[in-house]
Image: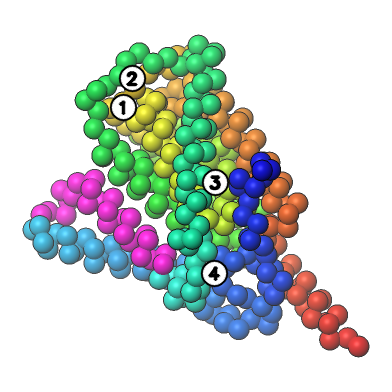
Amino acid sequence: MKISSFWVDPQVQLRASDLLPPDQPAKPWPPQHPVRFNALVRFLAFVGLLAAVAVVTGSIYFAVTTRDPLQASYWQTEVTLIVSCLVAYLVTGLVTEGRLDLIELSPHRLSGLLRGLLFGLAAVAVCLGLLAALGAYRVVGVNHDYVPWADLMTLGLGAALTEEIMFRGVALRLLEDVFGSWAAVALTATSFGLLHVANPEGTWQGGVAIVIEAGLLLAAIYIVSRSLWWVMGFHFAWNMAQGPLFGSVVSGSEERQTWLVAELTGPDWLTGGVFGLEASLVPVVLLGGVAVWLLVLAQRRGLMVAPWWVRRRRLLAEAAQTASP
């Protein structure tokens, strides 16, 4: 099996009718639904649905429990956000975009989830293995009292599902529809990374590192696979492996208990400092390299979407050529 076949779904191709991938609504030229399929309209539909479902879900919970909304636990907060994101995305895709088969979340493509989980776990293991070989990472104990449920909900399921829907499922797809794949990758990767600077122990070094090792990589994986399962699996495994499993701080978040108790010692450029593994040069080089390779692969295989004005010009030229005697 070729290495590229692990990442690329051979069924994912740009449509000849509109030069768009299958996770976009059909938009031939001239357009059939110019307002309904407009990227801004689809974005506003998602945001509106997200807010509405969050209000309804939260109201039902607090009406049943009669608790003060300001005292909501992480369970209620995460469940509300997860349900809101998922429902808003499904309704936007099925109703607003009129796509009866959401290829990026198709149950028939659940194998992408396993691939993402395996790659995420392997990526953390390799990065920490290299740091251990350099004397920068050492396991000093095992916390047998560690209870993983809170981390599974927040660092794992909550972050993987909500962030991937928002950044890859919504932002990347809609920006790609207007400005093309390259601009969408750059914009979503940058915003995704710099958003983490606001974390409790956030640093600019960590934010820039996440732009490269996570923002670019997750965008690249999505473009070659068109699978939210794939990027959700990687995101889940990456967070859970580096923090709760191997004992590193995750994205400059507050310190928490972990299963393995570990020490990272050495210069910040190597260990990541207070931000954790993600600010280390090791994952930046390794995962950034994979991201660049995947983006080049996507370009060579014709999977990168052109800006809308370029697509329109090509479609008009093809129509004129077909109509000419």
Q: Is residue 71 magenta?
A: yes
The numbered dot on residue 112 is none
The residue lying toward the viewer, choosing from 161 and 11, is 11
Give 122 or 249, whichever is nearer the viewer: 122
Residue 74 is left or right of residue 129, and the answer is left
Of tags 3 and 4, the one toward the viewer is 3
Residue at x 68% of width, y 73% of height? 18
Of tags 4 and 2, the one toward the viewer is 2
Camera-side residue: 85 or 16? 16
Q: Distance of mark 4 from mark 2, alpha carbons?
A: 46 Å
The numbered mark, 4 or 1, whose residue comes first in the sequence reads 4
Q: Tell which circle, 4 or 2, labels the residue nearer the N-terminal end.
A: 4
What residue appears at the point 71 percent right and 46 percent down from the top-left corner? 296
The circle on residue 218 is 3
Q: Residue drawn at (38%, 46%), measured in percent from left and top? A: 159
Q: Residue 167: percent from the left, percent from the top? A: 49, 53
User: Along the polypeptide, which appears first: circle 3 or circle 1?
Assistant: 3
Magenta region: which residues?
67-90
Q: State how far apart marks 4 and 1 are (Cα).
A: 42 Å
User: Mark 1 sits on what residue?
Assistant: 258
Residue placed under numbered mark 4 in the picture: 39
Q: Amino acid at mark 4?
A: Ala
At label 3, which amino acid type do we have? Leu
Alpha carbons under labels 2 and 1: distance apart:
6 Å
Q: Which residue is mark 2?
A: 261
Q: Earlier in the sequence, mark 2 or mark 3?
A: 3
x and y, in percent, of residue 173 in the image: 55, 61
Q: Are marks 2 and 1 in contact (CB under 8 Å)?
A: yes
Inspect the image, locate mark 2, and give the three-letter code of the amino acid beneath it: Val
Can residue 121 be seen here? The reply is yes
Would you place residue 185 above or below residue 284 in this image?
below
> Answer yes or no: do the residues labelled 3 and 4 have beta carbons within 8 Å?
no
